[in-house]
């Protein structure tokens, strides 16, 4: 079967640090809905294909939060790395959301899993979207190559760890900010997994960073994690100490930096994003 | 009469680049309403009073846009300069807004003038608020000194030029991004001035940057201006060429940088804010 070219429609373009921030709309066959994503193409992409850092955002975010608030584009432009920011869930009137209208499930809260339960299974396949469909679309349409890094924040930090661990060989670098490290034992994760994945908690382990590390799944990409110590979600939702113990027990290389006084906001991310970009560049650039 | 201490209420605090982003609410006697402003205090403010760059935002903005989107706090933290971001108009149910609900007048669109016409004159006194009340409040309450810089974007670029030109000796440094340079001859300015200042166009000249420069009002603070050439508002609303001519005729020192491909967004501001911070630091730091 020949591969059909998938159209992407540019909906915004802003020159930034000598490169371009662009937003695109496309129909996702994986998610069965229209999706919007954002890409920062550094100046170097005018002449050659560049590596791409995929950024997975947290609860309630769209493609816009990281691009506007993280202050990441300056160093990405210096280093010559593209940044790709997908949305955080399938969207649209035909996509079911939280029955109670809550912000921590459904729209804006896809948790980067492939749902197995109804009515979620038809659209909520964010793992396959961010790991397969989106990179393939980008690599066919834009000047990015297959040297891929993965990072994210909170729910997106969980997504980054899980997507990289489940897909050895697909990413060259990995980091996270304040990830939900042990989703199956956190209130956010329990709510999401019980609906997307069903009542069998055994099935949740394949979508939990600490469980995947403990099971020795995936390759041992050196992991850089920043966590603010004034983060109101630290103990109950994020559990960095559990991540530390899982990595130590499994021999997974982890640099966990506990940052005194920092919270869960983009002011925290902005303060340390340059270190993450350089961590990724060391693995992504030739 | 003894000066009464004015209370300010902290409503948010985020550690950022070793310093603090903080938001405060207070009652403004000038504007006769409650106001919110944001301050970034760099790490150096823990030990000593630091200079402050006042940033005036554009139409529809609040105290939040610049702090979240400009990427300015990194270099401010390095240099040891505080940043102060006021709101762009008086706010609240008792403050009249645009009769038609438009976004370019009223709430979010104070134009940094002192209104003389009813029903605006009671609350719309943003010039006096940003030039006098807010700095005095900050210098009495927070570790900032009287070494003040002034900058802004679009309507706030107009505000920065006009407030500095009208108040010689009050600021040590001045810059702007895409300012409304000749407000009395721009559609945004004509709408605002005709309501805030009345039908007599002669009275508008005291609130127009090009007219003030042409009249030789104020001191000749070296002026750094960045303007994107892909800015959709360039010719009709912003008129940088008129500013260039006014400065040339009056001998006002101007560095006008026309940036190819850049638009009116915060992606443009972020790309060049570091240069502005260093321009201000050269004048503000001892």
Image: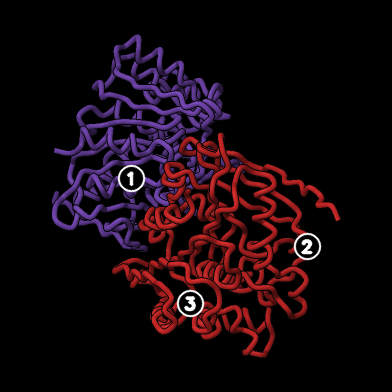
Chain colours: A red, B purple
- Disc 1 chain ID: B
Q: Residue A181's mark?
A: 3
Relative placement, left or right, of B77 versus B285 is right
- Whichever of callouts 2 and 3 sits on the residue coming sooner in the sequence is 2
Q: Residue B30's mark?
A: 1
Dot 1: few (<14), some (14–19), or many (≥20) neighbours within 10 Å?
A: many
Relative placement, left or right, of B258 versus A35 is left
Give how far across and how far down residue A44 sits, in percent.
Answer: 51, 38
Say above or below: B222 vs A183.
above
Tell whether label 3 touches label 2 (CB within 8 Å).
no
Are the residues under marks 1 and 3 on the same chain? Answer: no
Q: Along the line of sight, which residue is nearer the eye, B51 or A19?
A: A19
Residue at the (37%, 58%) spot, across then down: A272
Say above or below: A252 vs A266.
below
Q: Along the line of sight, which residue is nearer the eye, A282 or A208?
A: A282
Work out how far the residue at label 1 is from the one at label 3, CA to CA, in angstroms. Answer: 50 Å
Tell whether label 1 touches label 2 (CB within 8 Å).
no
Give how far across and how far down residue A18 sits, in percent.
Answer: 48, 35
Dot 3: few (<14), some (14–19), or many (≥20) neighbours within 10 Å?
A: many
Say above or below: A218 vs B197.
below
The residue where tag 2 is placed is A32
Front position among marks 2 and 1: 2
Work out how far the residue at label 2 is from the one at label 1, CA to CA, in angstroms. Answer: 55 Å
- Disc 2 chain ID: A
Give how far across and how far down residue B176 sits, in percent.
Answer: 38, 31
Residue at the (50%, 23%) spot, across then down: B199
Q: Along the line of sight, which residue is nearer the eye, A261 or A242?
A: A242
């Amino acid at each position: 079967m020949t591969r059909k070219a998938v159209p992407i429609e540019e909906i915004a373009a802003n020159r930034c640090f000598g490169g371009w921030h662009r937003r695109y709309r496309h129909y996702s066959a994986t998610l069965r809905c229209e999706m919007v994503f954002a890409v920062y193409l550094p100046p170097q992409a005018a002449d050659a294909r560049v590596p791409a850092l995929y950024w997975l955002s947290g609860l309630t975010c769209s493609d816009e939060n990281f691009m506007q608030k993280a202050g990441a584009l300056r160093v990405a432009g210096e280093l010559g790395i593209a940044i790709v920011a997908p949305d955080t869930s399938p969207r649209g009137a035909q996509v079911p959301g939280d029955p109670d209208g809550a912000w921590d499930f459904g729209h804006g809260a896809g948790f980067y899993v492939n749902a197995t339960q109804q009515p979620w299974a038809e659209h909520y396949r964010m793992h396959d979207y961010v790991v397969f469909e989106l990179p393939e679309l980008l690599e066919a349409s834009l000047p990015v190559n297959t040297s891929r890094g993965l990072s994210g924040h909170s729910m997106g930090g969980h997504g980054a760890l899980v997507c990289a661990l489940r897909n050895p060989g697909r990413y060259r670098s990995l980091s996270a900010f304040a990830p939900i490290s042990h989703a199956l034992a956190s209130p956010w994760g329990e709510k999401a997994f019980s609906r997307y994945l069903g009542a069998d908690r055994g099935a949740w382990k394949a979508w939990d960073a600490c469980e995947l590390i403990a099971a020795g799944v995936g390759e041992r990409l050196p992991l850089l994690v920043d966590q603010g110590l004034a983060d109101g979600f630290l103990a109950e939702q994020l559990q960095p100490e559990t991540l530390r113990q899982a990595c130590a027990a499994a021999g997974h290389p982890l640099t966990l930096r506990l940052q005194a006084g920092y919270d869960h906001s983009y002011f925290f991310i902005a303060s340390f994003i340059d270190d993450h970009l350089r961590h990724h560049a060391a693995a992504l650039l030739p």
